[in-house]
Image (cartoon, grey):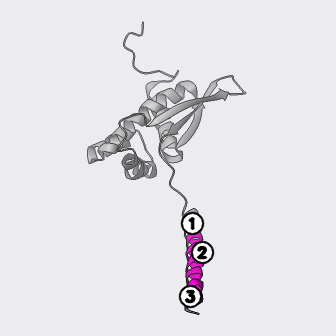
Amino acid sequence: MRHGAKIKKLGRPAAHRRAMLGNLATSVIMHRSVTTTAVRARAVCRVVEHLVTLAKRGDLHARRLAAATIHDKAALHMLFAEIGPQLAARTGGYTRALRVGIRQGDGAALSVVQLLVERPQPAKEKTKEKKKKSKTESSTETAKKEKTAKESA
């Protein structure tokens, strides 16, 4: 009997399961979204929720606890520098798992795990917006100059 069993074993030994969930959690943090099987998706959601809670704390002890799961320094930095502050106002529910269908090869149910933060806008789009604004500002300035020239004439 599995009374009080809190974790899914996922058909793997403990060390393999921890490594797999850590790798999936790292991918979710880096890419904001990962497609995997439905059972793994539910398991990795719990791991990512805990990591985001640690990132919201932001102290050294929390960083070291998160580093036990995430072995990529860039992902750890992204978690504590970007994701934690973005989700500071939220009290839970940082991830969602959406079913997307069935895998062709073995018929496994697939899900997409998404981290519920906004992606940072690329720098190229910001410069385009600034150029558009500067063009519209320059056109309004020329229109104002033309108006003043007509009024003075």
Secondary structure beneath dot 1 equals helix
The amino acid sitting under disc 2 is Lys
How many numbered marks have been drawn onto this rendered protein structure?
Answer: 3
Secondary structure beneath dot 2 equals helix
* Range drawn in magenta: 131-150
Whether 136 is drawn above or below 3: the answer is: below
> Can residue 131 be spotted in the picture?
yes
Viewer-nearest of discs 3 and 2: 3
Image quarter hosting the N terminus = top left
70 is within the stretch colored magenta: no
Viewer-nearest of discs 3 and 1: 3
Considering the whole magenta stretch, tell me its main secondary structure: helix
Q: Residues within 10 Å of mark 2 (few under 14, many from 20)?
A: few
Residue at the image point whose x is 69% and y is 23% from the top? 106
* Residue at the outermost top position: 1
**Residue 86 shown left or right of residue 130 in the figure:** left
Which residue is identified by label 3? 151
The amino acid sitting under disc 1 is Glu
The amino acid sitting under disc 3 is Glu
Question: Which numbered disc flags the more N-terminal residue, 2 or 1?
Answer: 1
Residue 64, horizontal then vertical, whole percent:
32, 44
Q: Of residues 46 and 119, which is closer to you in this image? A: 119
* Residue at the outermost bottom position: 153
